[in-house]
Amino acid sequence: MHALRLSHQGAPTGSARVATMSGKADKLRVAVVFGGRSAEHAISCVSAGSVIAALDPDRYEVVPVGIATDGRWVLADGDQRMAISDGTLPEVTGGTAVSLVGDPEGRGFAVLEPGAAVGRALTEVDVVFPVLHGTFGEDGTIQGLLEMAGLPYVGSGVFASAASMDKEFTKKLLAAAGLPQGDHVVLRDASGAVCPDPGVLDGATRERLGLPVFVKPSRAGSSIGITKVTDWAQFPEAVATAAAVDPKVIVEAAVPGREIECGVLAARGNGLPESSLPAEIRLRPGTDWYDFAAKYLDDAVDFDVPADLSPEQTAAVQDAARRAYLALDCRGLARVDFFLGTSPDGGDLLVINEVNTMPGFTPISMFPRMWAASGVSYPELVDRLIASALTTGSRPVR
């Protein structure tokens, strides 16, 4: 379990700028927001625990703000579990109810007191680190809320977050930038379905996609709601599983090849964004594909960090990752996922699978591991993200 370094002792005070526990008021106050109304709630908690543990207490004062699965915002207490333990996933519970202050002059959170007409001030914050994955966290919604509140925040803005979260529009924007995609079909609800019955694809489409296919919620992550279909008889149930997570479903043809990932960070100064050394995910025998259990619960994969690639392959992956970051107008950070296979002429075939604007920050997550292999330690990585957010993390209020 990761211990939380809270920015308060007991009940929050009513002052606009609370002194730290050491009595100093010159530390940078960072609100780490985690949990959320998403199927990736638990993974967000684990990621946030790692981020909090990496923040230097001599430089930062942490304000840990959890969002419960029902949408309540709380100032987390010391009992908040932030790690997977014996297969049990963490969840935001308890804490003091708080609300983001919408007025840009407020710059922080207010305590919601039972029976009170107005919440009282808790604290200002200097920057927000929304360690949120999935719906209502990585899809532009909280980014819009923070923009309205005038708070700098880590990560991409509203548009890039929304576009990168939606696999359909990620593919469209990357294709427009000349970046290769795998074959796919989008299924919507009955009013806009690609085919009359979203549980059935016509014969020509089936032949084009081939088997296996992966049926996915269009706007979700961590492999939640995804089914690998090896027989078309499985297809209707796979669509129903995905649609339970998101009403828009994407069906992707399998892309044979190695699973390669690459991290991107905002440039220092006015240069191009920086790409990490790529990494490779290798499934162990008996593991069919990289699903949720393989990612977080089972000892089912090996990670090569960095990946065993030629210098030319490494350069191609890094260049494509930067181009994808720019094509989606990302900010701060992103993780770009690839398949590296063989083209019909025998050369390399590099296909982009997804772009993640708030990749996992768990101890085993690839994004921090790739940057560590590239010479940027976890604490340094968090420092760079916060510094970037303070420079470009929100639009100025006019």
Image: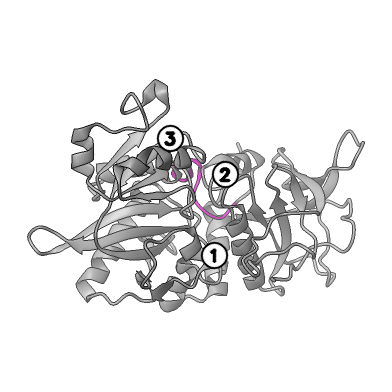
The picture quadrant where one finds residue 149 is top right
Kind of residue at badge 3: Lys
Q: Which residue is mark 2?
A: 143
Q: Are marks 3 and 1 in contact (CB under 8 Å)?
A: no
Local packing at callout 3 (Cα closer than 10 Å; few below 14, some 14-19, many 20+) is many
Taking 181 as reference, is 148 above or below it? above
354 and 5: which is toward the camera? 354
Q: Residue at x 59, y 63 (%)?
A: 47
Taking 179 as reference, is 64 above or below it? below
Q: Which residue is mark 3?
A: 248
Taking 141 as reference, is 86 above or below it? below
> What element does badge 3 sit on?
loop
- Region of the chain picked out in magenta, as a range: 153-161
Q: Residue at x 39, y 43 (%)?
A: 167
Residue 383 relative to residue 274: left or right: right
Disc nearest the viewer among 3 and 1: 3
Residue farthest top in this picture: 191
- Disc ID at residue 361: 1
**Residue 396 appears anywhere in the view:** no
**Residue 337 appears anywhere in the view:** yes
> What element does badge 1 sit on?
loop
Q: Earlier in the sequence, mark 3 or mark 1?
A: 3
Kind of residue at badge 1: Phe
- Magenta span contains residue 170: no
